[in-house]
Image (cartoon, grey):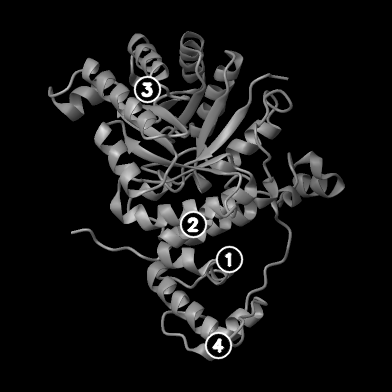
Amino acid sequence: MAKNKIYIIDVTNRDGVQTAMLGLAKLEKTMINIYLDEMGIYQSEFGFPATRHETSYLNANLELVKMGVLKPIILSGWIRAIKKDVEEATRLTRVKHLNLSISTSQQMVRGKFEGRKGREDIIKMMTEACDRAKEKGMETFGVNAEDASRTDDEYLIRFAQAAKEHGACRIRYCDTLGYDDPFSIYEKVKLLAEEVKLPIELHCHNDLGMAVACSVAGAKAAIDSGVDAYINTTINGMGERCGNADLVSVILAIKKSRGLENKYILGQRIDISCAWKIAKYASYAFGVPLPINQPAVGANAFAHESGIHADGALKDRRNYELYDFEELGRGEPEIIETGRQITAGEYSGIKGFRNVYGKLEVKFKDDKEARKILELVRYANVHTQKPLTDGELRFIAKYPEQAKKILTVTPQV
């Protein structure tokens, strides 16, 4: 078994929310963090600390960390690798973990900066940002090489070495356009890890349909080279253009595939039985149905129809099922209300509200508390523009002060 380990950093709340024409409300992002923590995910890149409309949400979630509600998950923010963003992030929030991102390929340096900055300027900007992050007391920070897959080896190594010398705890290798294949990323990450001797974080996009394969191949390369690996995932593979590496698929690939099972291990306690719950919630929150053939959580993932398959699965599930649906938290019947329904919304009154919370077996100490939570639930419905889930309703009742902050967005204009 390999000495080094693979850690999962989920970026649904940073990259997943950048899915064009979609997004998540701040309450929904908070529930994602809670469910990721329950699942045992190592870290959530929970947002943009230099972006002002995120401030209340980010600080409220950091309060939940301090309270022990979000524990042991680490919450990290994404900023550009420039001093100004470090200063703004630390002024607006109490974040202690950051990822600093800047482009490294010739194409992007030339195409974005249009001659105003050269590649030496890129390294200088990045190292100055790293120094500022240290001065501001960051507990950890990583450096992201955007478009690393299209960056020449010599420059990428020099960039990563400079990041290491200025305090970066790892390098994020970004296959920003999904350009790599599993073989090319293995070779490039192996070279980078051997030369720099710093943990490698894999951030793969799915433009060619290989994000999961490239993520695990890159992680294998890092571990084979003697350093830890970190894989970026999103729930249900959400993300820009064709999305990112799907969280559940990556975990199953590491735990169940022929070349990785019992050889490459996850560095944190993963409760895979949360898979069904978190995939369903993200599907509802984003408003994107799960594909019928989605690995593990799609409607047909455990469906058998043809004679040979059905016969084989009934005799022994291992004939046609690589893993068990019970492992994923599936198998319970879903009850759909077809009669009278009382829901809590932005125009709810106290009686309907009490009926909804009564079904959840949530009690209030007095009428004053009930009306306070009702008001928060009304605002939350305005906030999400969809019926609140049981989990969201329970969260608001249990942590009303943090919920109030999460629902507060004040334009700074």
- C-alpha span from label 4 to label 1: 22 Å
Mark 2 Cα shell of 10 Å, populated few (<14), some (14-19), many (≥20):
many
Answer left or right for 55 relative to 279.
Answer: left
Answer left or right for 124 relative to 215.
Answer: left
Q: Which residue is mark 1?
A: 391
Q: Quadrant of the N terminus?
A: top right
- C-alpha span from label 4 to label 2: 27 Å
- C-alpha span from label 1 to label 3: 39 Å
Q: Give the SS element for disc 2.
A: helix
Q: Which residue is mark 4?
A: 367
Residue 265 is tagged as none
Q: Give the SS element for disc 3.
A: helix
- C-alpha span from label 3 to label 4: 57 Å
Mark 1 Cα shell of 10 Å, populated few (<14), some (14-19), many (≥20):
few
Q: Are dots 3 and 4 in contact, CB under 8 Å?
A: no
User: Could you say where residue 235 lies in the image, as x and y percent from the top left?
Assistant: 52, 47
Q: Of the residues under marks 2 and 3, which one precedes in the sequence?
A: 2
- C-alpha span from label 1 to label 2: 11 Å
Amino acid under disc 1? Gly
x 54%, y 91%: residue = 351
Quarter location, residue 178 = top left
Q: Of the residues under marks 1 and 3, which one precedes in the sequence?
A: 3
